[in-house]
Image (cartoon, helix red, strand yellow):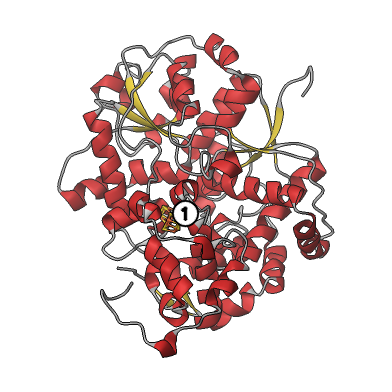
């Protein structure tokens, strides 16, 4: 990327193509406006994260296979999903550092004419924005600062923890997403439990516990008088946006907190129209606070 | 964890179990747990679950209550948020210990939550853990998104076969809900 455009292979994972095109659409828009070139993977498979609980080896080989494809393309991987980042980054780091493990995994990969070499990096969107593009450039791209909007961050787990694996942010007081949010002119408020989990990974075996976890977070967000919640992971987004009506029903309360992908928030501040950023796909409709930044879109009326 | 205050019978103790667990990556330090309780105190799932307690899981492994912990469905309630991993003063990496328990449990008991079986089967069929409907794939075009990259379900199936997951899936029972 020296001198040229920053260039990445985009790793979409499974959840985004399955049901969250709003994240993909808005991410492609803002990254392109920031001069990032996204190259499509020639092919890929699930990152391995959902399979790790039942078979660690299967998950490692699934992740390693994706990394090998990226190595053959000679580009770093950019993920939009915390789960994909966690899985791919963990395996990439482990195979780079542990020669014995690398040899063991390469035995599997031989069957597909692949070999892990250790020549690429795996980055989450937040790392690409904060480290590779930089705050200065993002700040200069803001045309319509979202001043007066108060929002809360939900960084999610796997881009901050485990600390010794990720090491890019402070897991006890995560700053990267908060700083990125503040660049848009919106104010990112502090609230209790900012660094806590959304609960989504166990929803397949138990709904009540994750709904209680998410409800507790939403309560803290309401107490901090935030007017929207900002996510950077499709799993977390589904938990707070798509599932919000179900949480409201379970607890018999009205929550009504709109949940935006960070790329939608940034896109608005960069001057994109809400319809260009797929705001109409959000389940929880924009409230009055948010609406003043969307006012030219009649389809978003509550 | 299933029922409170169960007595431990000498016959159910398998003193080698902790070494079996410590062979798993990330679970090496299980023997160092000194029962401080930090993991349970900081675990968001423990806050809402009546039975899920990572500290107790660590102690059951140390005691060698192998059959009891492997058949306890509560091990499927960890969200892998890794808070316990960051906070444990003994560096036990309890989330990885729980992953080891789940892996062993699937292998020994041939039983797993239905959701994982479905995700794994979708993955072998499509390369993704969800079956992405044709309409979604078409809609990408309308939305101006590039076509979805291709996948290689045959190679995924081969990975499942080589790593032993394929035969496990074929022979395992499933259960749906925990707690
Ligand atoms: S925090 Fe670590 S040492 Fe303390 S009880 Fe949990 S696993 Fe054991
Ligand atoms: S990783 Fe699992 S056991 Fe550890 S704190 Fe999170 S939910 Fe609890």
Residue farthest toward the left in the current orientation of the protein: A252
- How many marks the image carries: the answer is 1
Please say if A209 is above or below A171. below
Q: Nearer the viewer, residue A289 or A91?
A: A91
Q: Nearer the viewer, residue B153 or A202?
A: A202
Image point (59%, 62%), residue name: B28
Q: Position of residue A197 (x, y in %)?
A: 40, 45
**Left or right relative to A192: residue B55:** right
**Left or right relative to A100: residue A90:** left
Mark 1 CB in 8 Å range of ligand 2? Answer: yes
Q: Which of the image's four quarters has the C terminus of chain A?
A: top left
Q: Quadrant of ligand 2?
A: bottom left
Q: Which of the image's four quarters has the N terminus of chain A?
A: top right
Q: Position of residue B177 (x, y in %)?
A: 34, 69
Image point (55%, 12%), residue name: A141
Helix, strand or loop at label 1? It is: loop
Please say if B128 is above or below B142. below
Chain letter of mark 1 equals B
Displayed quadrant of residue B40: bottom left
Q: Nearer the viewer, residue A166 or A109?
A: A166
Q: Note whether residue A280 is visible.
A: yes
Give the class, few, some or many, for how many residues have Cα within 10 Å of label 1's Cα (few <14, many ≥20). Answer: many
Q: Position of residue B120 (x, y in %)?
A: 55, 66
Displayed quadrant of residue B141: top right
**Left or right relative to B52: residue B118:** right
Residue carrying label 1: B80
Q: Position of residue A100 (x, y in %)?
A: 79, 59
């Amino acid at each position: 990327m020296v001198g040229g455009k920053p260039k990445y292979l985009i790793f979409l994972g499974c959840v985004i193509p399955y049901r969250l095109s709003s994240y993909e659409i808005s991410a492609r828009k803002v990254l392109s406006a920031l001069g990032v070139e996204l190259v499509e993977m020639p092919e890929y498979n699930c990152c391995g994260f959902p399979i790790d609980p039942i078979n660690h080896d299967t998950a490692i080989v699934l992740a390693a296979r994706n990394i090998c494809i990226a190595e053959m393309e000679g580009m770093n991987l950019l993920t939009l999903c915390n789960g994909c980042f966690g899985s791919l980054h963990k395996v990439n780091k482990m195979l780079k550092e542990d020669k014995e493990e690398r040899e063991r995994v390469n035995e599997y990969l031989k069957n597909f004419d692949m070999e892990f070499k250790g020549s690429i990096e795996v980055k989450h969107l937040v790392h690409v924005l904060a480290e590779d593009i930089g705050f200065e450039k993002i700040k200069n791209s803001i045309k319509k600062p979202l001043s007066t909007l108060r929002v809360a961050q939900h960084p999610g787990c796997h881009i901050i923890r485990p600390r010794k694996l990720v090491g890019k942010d402070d897991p006890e007081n995560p700053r990267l997403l908060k700083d990125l949010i503040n660049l848009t002119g919106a104010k990112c408020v502090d609230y209790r439990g900012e660094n806590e989990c959304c609960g989504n990974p166990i929803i397949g075996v138990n709904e009540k516990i994750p709904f209680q976890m998410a409800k507790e977070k939403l309560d803290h967000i309401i107490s901090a008088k935030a007017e929207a919640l900002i996510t950077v992971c499709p799993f977390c987004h589904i938990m707070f946006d798509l599932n919000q009506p179900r949480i409201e029903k379970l607890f018999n309360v009205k929550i009504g907190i709109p949940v935006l992908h960070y790329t939608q928030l940034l896109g608005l501040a960069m001057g994109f129209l809400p319809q260009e950023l797929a705001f109409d796909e959000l389940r929880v409709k924009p409230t009055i606070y948010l609406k003043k930044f969307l006012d030219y879109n009649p389809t978003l009326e509550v | 964890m299933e029922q409170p205050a169960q007595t431990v019978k000498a016959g159910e103790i398998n003193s080698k179990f902790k070494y079996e667990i410590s062979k798993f990556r990330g679970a090496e330090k299980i023997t160092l747990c000194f029962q401080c309780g930090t993991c349970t105190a900081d675990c968001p799932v423990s806050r809402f679950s009546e039975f899920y307690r990572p500290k107790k899981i660590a102690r059951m492994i140390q005691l060698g209550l192998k059959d009891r912990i492997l058949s306890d469905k509560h091990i499927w309630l960890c969200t892998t948020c890794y808070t316990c991993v960051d906070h444990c003063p003994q560096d036990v990496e309890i989330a990885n210990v729980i992953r080891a328990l789940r892996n062993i449990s699937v292998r020994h008991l041939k039983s797993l939550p239905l959701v994982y079986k479905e995700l794994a089967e979708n993955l072998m069929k499509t390369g993704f853990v969800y079956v992405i409907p044709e309409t979604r794939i078409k809609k990408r075009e309308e939305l101006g998104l590039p076509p979805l990259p291709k996948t290689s379900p045959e190679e995924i199936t081969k990975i499942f076969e080589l790593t032993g997951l394929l035969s496990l899936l074929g022979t395992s029972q499933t259960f749906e809900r925990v707690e």
